[in-house]
Amino acid sequence: MKAAILPAFGQPLEIHTKPDPPNRHRRSPRRSSRSPNLPLHQRSPKRCPQIPAPSPRNARLRRHRPCDRYRARRNDPAAWRLGILRPNRAQQRQPLQPGHRAAGWSARGPGGQKIQAYHRDGTFASRVRVPTENAIPIGEIEDAEAGHWCALAALLIPYGGLLAMEFRAGETLLVSGATGPLGGATVLLALAMGAREVIAVGRNEGKLAQLRERLGPRVVPVKLSGDSEKDIAAMKAAAAGGIDAVLDFLPPAASATVARSAIMAVRPYGRVVLMGGVGMLGGEELQLPYPWIMRNLITIKGQWMYEPSAVRTIVGMIRSGQLDISAFDVTEFSLENINEAVDHAAETGGPFKLTIARP
């Protein structure tokens, strides 16, 4: 098989011919169909955190949730059929062993690093081996559609947040960090799920205007001023019937004050789900008033990724036409041009932009 090899952090990828991955217990060899490429996969250490991983020698660059076709079986579920398309989940759910989560990404703790040492290779390759429990069938699709189905990489994470807050049709959602890839996907999903309005909050007035232009008048943009009290008032004023729920996708570089302002805009009995990166690179901690949370019966919840059951229902939304993945702009590169794909993803990343590696 062909594979993109990362010889060292900060170095260009190299295309090598490698043996196909072996077929082992509860591991599923699959032919990679399309592989989405995140903007933060840029090779420069200044632009991308160095993910904890085994020595990069002979290690393929890790990347985000591909769509692959199942090629071989070993102790697998009887319902699986050769050739059917599946996305690759990025984690295993072990509530009492959180270090097992996000293998191939952060893989926290000794347990996660053991899994990462075994599954040391990413999936910029023509064949990939993944844990069976991480491969979830989505059914038959045409090969020409595979690129757009990679939008699942951007959609499933915010969908997990919307399910966690039990978001309902007719409610108003505020998206904090709406101009990023995950924030924009959240706006699209909330509208597909029947939101009355989506309050899209961010600093970039141009990108906020593009969201409304692309997705319609139910998107209500609010540009942040930097003054917390003014921003809270502006967010509340933008929602005709009050803000029922808040989903935060602010990046690590964002101030905790911005996250606090969005949370404080929610109505009494409102729900807040935190899925961003505030505080992960240091800086101020998120501080909220205890009396306000208690007296207004506010629910605040952290959500990491999504549950396996989310795949089946989001696929149903796509197949029914309720969720339109053609909203994503897809640019495909062959595996041989993987370095161009990495550069393109870094330069053009944003809402509804997909850069795809095609084996």
Image (tube, helix red, strand yellow):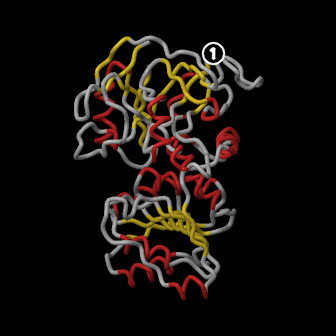
Viewer-closest of 224 and 82: 82
| Residue 112 x, y percent position in the rendering | 49, 41
**In this view, which residue lies farthest toward the front?**
110
Q: Position of residue 127 (x, y in %)?
A: 49, 18
At a point 39% along the width and 19% down the height, the residue shown is: 3
Res 261 quadrant in image: bottom left
Picture coordinates of residue 221, whole percent (x, y): 45, 67
Query: Does residue 82 appear to the left or right of 144 in the view shown?
Result: right
Front position in the image: 322 or 293: 293
**Dot 1 amino acid type:** Ala
Q: Compare residues 180 and 23 and report the one nearer the observer.
A: 23
Rendered residue at 47%/76% (across/down): 235
Residue at point 61%, 58% (across, down): 162
Using the image, determine if residue 69 lies above or below residue 211: above
In this figure, which residue is indicated by the disc labeled 1? 72
The N terminus, quarter of image: top left
Q: Is residue 47 above or below residue 43?
A: below
- Seen in the picture, residue 228 relative to 68 is either above or below; the reply is below
Which quarter shows the C terminus?
top left
Q: Is residue 11 left or right of residue 93?
A: left
